[in-house]
Image (tube, rainbow, N blue to C red):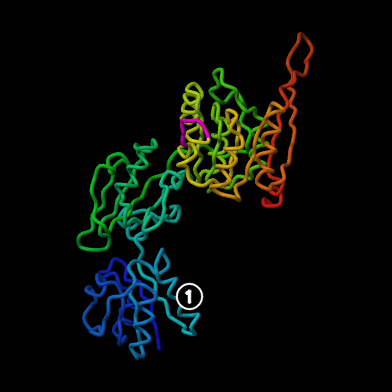
Amino acid sequence: MKITLIGMGSGCPESLTVQGYAALREADLILGARRLLSALPAGCTENRAAAYLPDEILELLYASGCENAALLYSGDTGFYSGASALVERLQAQGYQPVVLPGLSSVQMLSAALGRPWQDWKLVSAHGRACDPVAECMEGRPTFFLTGGSESPATLCAQLAAEGFGKLAAAVGENLGTPEQKVYTGTVGQLAASHFESLSVLLVEAAQVPSRRTQGLPDEAFARGKVPMTKQEVRAAVLAKLGVQPGELLWDVGAGTGSVSVELALAAPRGRVYAVECDPEACALIRQNKEKFAVRNLTLVEGTAPAALENLPAPDAVFIGGTKGNMAAVVEAALARNPAARVCISAIALETLSAAVAALTAHGLQAEVCQISVSRAKAAGKLHLLMANNPIFLITRADEAEKSV
């Protein structure tokens, strides 16, 4: 059986490639979504069936007895298309399907706006989890394929709620069809609009903090009287945690939010939850969030472990303070993700003991590192080293192996 997978672009006959049109005219069976079948050009077989799930397509192919089948897909077969999954299934059963790509919604919006798309970040929010704030944290235009529960308006509403309301954006509606419309405005304006189900969104580049090596100067943060994790210790914490750009992170007992900010900068496509119960500290976290424009940082006001109950599972956790609830906080983190990387800071020996005990209670070996930092201070014509309190960092002993 000859099997051809065809990208039909917008679903209009006019958006078919010449190759795709020829393959459809030669086919003796055509499968695809009902909307695409109803738009087929003249001269195509009437032996058609509405199907788009791999299992039902394979069942129909086996039962048909045809020699030449064509399968229709909207847009381009290589852009978040069901074609890829079916190709794998067909190849596993010995078939060699032919794939004929079509026009993607990216290309059509690009053409409608009269600009190239090679620098856009491409994201699908169609039937999959999508954090638009995290996706827009790379400082380049971001294209969203929408559908299902996520529309251009819902994505814009989420962005506006996180401070991106003034960003320029464009929505392409029914692209490639006679009903095509393109709307432009700010994210905040588009959030209040309604768009047809066949719509896509382009959000212009956001101004994001430049990424740098961890360990921002202490003076860069709003501090007040709240204790703050110092620069040298913050650098060591991020090295211990081995943060990746798209990870989800907890900072428990966040204080001024200095570690939270560093985590958010290290994970621009991820999400950081700063958990803090002190009102003055929470105010400082908000100030530092705004100062560094880390929109992927969320403040959670409350005392751990209760404040952790509704947070998503973390990839890594920094624990800077627990109000005496060390065992319960570690339990909450590992219950959500037993493989979570954990780094705990301690000044007091009692806190060090509690941290080691909390990890060993879960069958984990604790690794303890002590950091002693002294800074020079002028005393007349001389400079004297003034010691800061020594800090203990406690981690899982297996984390060095996992990060290699």
Q: Is residue 327 left or right of residue 70?
A: right
Quadrant where the N terminus is found in the figure: bottom left
92 w.r.t. 326: above or below: below
* Front one among 238 and 343: 343
Magenta stretch: includes residue 218: no
**131 left or right of 35?**
right
Residue 199 occupies which quadrant of the picture?
A: bottom left
Q: Which residues are magenta?
A: 298-304
Q: Is residue 301 magenta?
A: yes
The amino acid marked with disc number 1 is Glu
Which quadrant holds residue 70? bottom left
Total numbered labels: 1
Q: Is residue 381 left or right of residue 25?
A: right
Q: Position of residue 299 (x, y in %)?
A: 46, 33
Looking at the image, which is closer to me, 326 or 224? 326
Q: Position of residue 172 (x, y in %)?
A: 29, 54
90 up-or-down from 207: above or below: below
The x and y percentages for residue 50 are: 27, 76
| Residue 155 located left or right of residue 278 | left
Extreme front residue here? 361
Across and down, in percent, residue 184 comes to 28, 46
The vertical placement of 64 against 103, above or below, is below
Residue named by callout 1: 88
* Local secondary structure at mark 1: helix
Q: Nearer the viewer, residue 47 or 353?
A: 353
Name the residue located 45 percent from the left edge and 76 percent from the top edge: 87
At 39% across and 37% down in the image, what residue appears? 162
